Image (cartoon, rainbow, N blue to C red):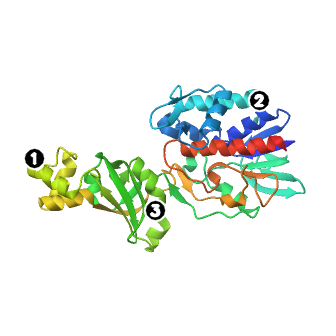
Amino acid sequence: MDTVIIGGGASGIVCAIRIKQNNPDINVTVLEHLDEACKKIHATGNGRCNITNKNADGFEVTRDFFESIGLMLRDSGEGRCYPYSNQASSVVCVMLSACEKLGVKIVTNCDVKKIEKLENQFNIFSDKGVFICDNLVLATGGRAQSSLGSDGSGYELAKTFGHTVSQLSPALVQLKSSTKNCRALKGVRAKCNVRIETNGTVTGEEFGELLFTEYGLSGIVIMNLSEKISDLKLKSGEERSLAVIDFVPEMSEQELNEHYAKFHSFDGILPHKLCAILSRQTDGDVSKIAKYMKNWRVIITGTKGYEYAQITKGGVKRDELDESFESKLCDNLYIIGELTDNQYKCGGFNLDFAFNSGIKAADKIARA
């Protein structure tokens, strides 16, 4: 029995390894259009690779899988788990070494042109020839960071088998703003509560670290909320979005006013540069400063786009796939990882899902 996996990223390589672990007699070939597999993993977690999170649904499965190929993990706080070496390169090295030991064939610089299914076999036409298999796994990733392999080509491949792709947009990405104060505050960080308001309705809210930049807003809290922003709808004028910031969620306006009455300054609460801008905005009106500290509004003009995004929001609809990520529309076709409509917050949850989807597909393929 032959299996071909299109895409040599996180989900695809883990799927390949797991299939061979379960059934060494299955021939597994991975087709990767870049010059090397797992290129995107090198860039994850600022080069450290936040593999999983202890709070992720599939944490134990992910941990056990990596231990089975010799990679140990360590908890670096808030449930985030990294390779013990703290190097993403270790993850890639161990995964590719496992592929070599188990006999997984990886074909790089391979562009898939089209796929046909004749009776019970898939014919995959590429610039490296035609590959024939009994089971086909689409693991091409989304559109985020195309230079690292995710060029969005997998969506069209999925559509050829009748699958529906929901609306796509960049996610876990920085937000752009036309508010000049963001540039003036470049480099300033704040732990705060942020909510996204679109056309007057709150669409998302979260507490976390915010970073002001020359283009707008960054930081984990912004990355997690970025999926609430639609570049297309903002550009068309259909939507208007704001980031509403509460810099001091632990204190009320009254308590802030009382603090100023006692100390004649807010420098003991917020960075001086931010205090100076708030004072300038309000002509030094203390009650207004307190109000702005609780309700500072930043106009959002869009995201930084797919090239800066960690993941893609949207994808192949989950209800078109079974629990093992096999297509309900085409037997022996599996669609895994970021190609599916599954998105999670920062902290290792998205990589954990990618690994787990690959493992679940592999387990079903090996049982067939």
Residue 327 visible here: yes
Q: Residue at x 57, y 50 (%)?
A: 146
The residue that mark 1 highlights is 263
The residue that mark 2 highlights is 102
Q: Amino acid at mark 2?
A: Leu
Q: Earlier in the sequence, mark 2 or mark 1?
A: 2
Q: From the viewer's perspective, is the residue at label 2 or at label 1 nearer?
A: 1
Mark 1, other Cα within 10 Å: few <14 / some 14–19 / many ≥20: few
245 to the left or right of 13? left
Q: Nearer the viewer, residue 54 or 156?
A: 54
The residue that mark 3 highlights is 229
Residue 30 position, x and y percent, is 74, 41
Q: Earlier in the sequence, mark 3 or mark 2?
A: 2
Q: Amino acid at mark 3?
A: Ile
Q: Amino acid at mark 1?
A: Phe
Residue 301 position, x and y percent, is 39, 64
Residue 335 position, x and y percent, is 71, 52
Q: Residue at x 49, y 38 (%)?
A: 45
Residue 304 visible here: no
Query: To which quarter of the image does residue 244 belong?
Result: bottom left
Quarter of the picture holding the C terminus: top right
Circle 1: element type = helix
Picture layout, residue 246 above or below residue 22: below
87 to the left or right of 248? right
Marks 2 and 1, how far apart in space?
A: 68 Å
Query: To which quarter of the image does residue 203 belong?
Result: bottom left
Circle 2: element type = helix
118 to the left or right of 314? right
Query: To which quarter of the image does residue 194 belong?
Result: bottom left
Q: Earlier in the sequence, mark 3 or mark 1?
A: 3
Q: Nearer the viewer, residue 71 or 277?
A: 71
